[in-house]
Image (cartoon, rainbow, N blue to C red):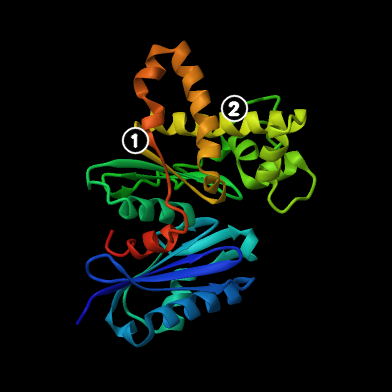
Amino acid sequence: MTALRVGVDIGGTKTEAVVLGPDGDIVAQLRVPTGFGAESVVATAVQAVTSVAGDSLDQVESIGVGIPGAVDTARGRVSHALNLGVESLDLGAELTRALAVTVPVRVENDVNAAALGAFHLLELPATASMGYLNLGTGLAAGLVLGGSLWRGSRGAAGEIGHILVDPSGPLDLDGQPGGLEVMASGSGIARQWGTGESNSVTAVLDAADSGDTRALDIRRRLFESVATSIRILVLTVDVDLVVIGGGISRLGPRLLGGVDEIFDGWAANSPFIASLDLPSRVRLLPEGSPVAALGAAYLGGR
């Protein structure tokens, strides 16, 4: 019997699922819309697993799910996934019952799952350490140390979006000023810009290129905060590599060019920071990679 692993990434609008073969290659992949509310989220996950596995469901040795919100990995419970309409859900148990499977169903925060997926996608050595910086609607990081996720004592490792770096900066949704998330996430930049464009980050960069003073300030905060996030991951854990993913990462050189300028300024003023060689330790995630679903598939047995 061929041993297969299924990974599911439940997002706010879409759910991706993959099947991994014994060699770790993706042998099946699909995307379906995500339902809203606890019952619909479970139904979406069931649809994704049964559709992507098809007649091979009996050959699946593990099922992993990445989902936004606070996740109790020991119990498979997710809470406060507000963009999914989920306040509290025993997702692992519900999926085990609905799928009628005896294999493990493991649930993980979506950024942690993406971190594990990026580690495997980039084929890093098992001994390597990596920080995954997700710049999307929010800002958070995942840590993979020696091939395994590092969650911390209470699961808060990597929640660097809540680190305050500018007491006079804009207010985040939690009421605190100048956090990394409000300055370098899609939602934070949209609140700062406040014009309602569907892609506020690109709109801000375009306006900054045209000399708009307010856009220049927002762009500066974006570049500084991304650079600071990388610096925090390197200085606290000394990871070999920081991989940037999420929607903002699609800006590519437009983002990294601004971040590298910040690095250069720091290095010019500090021999110690220069010795860290921050630019060489940053990599963009390949665009279109289903890293959260891939990482979820690797949750089984790890």
The quarter of the displayed image where residue 127 is located: top left
Q: Residue at x 56, y 39 (%)?
A: 161
Q: Residue 77 at what x, y percent from top left? A: 48, 63
Instruction: Please state which of residues 89 and 124 is positioned toward the viewer in this rendering.
Output: 124
Q: Residue 36 at what x, y percent from top left? A: 64, 71
Tell me the crowding category of disc 1: few under 14, some 14 to 19, or many 20 or more residues within 10 angstroms, Cα based: some
User: Callout 2, which amino acid?
Assistant: Val
- What's the distance in space between the residues labelled 2 and 1, CA to CA? 21 Å
Picture layout, residue 56 above or below residue 105: below
Q: Residue at x 68, y 33 (%)?
A: 209
Picture layout, residue 107 above or below residue 146: below
What residue would you read off at disc 2? 165
Instruction: Please state which of residues 146 and 117 is positioned toward the viewer in this rendering.
Output: 117
What residue would you read off at disc 1? 239
Res. 170 visible in picture? no
Q: Is residue 240 left or right of residue 49?
A: left
Q: Is residue 146 left or right of residue 44?
A: left
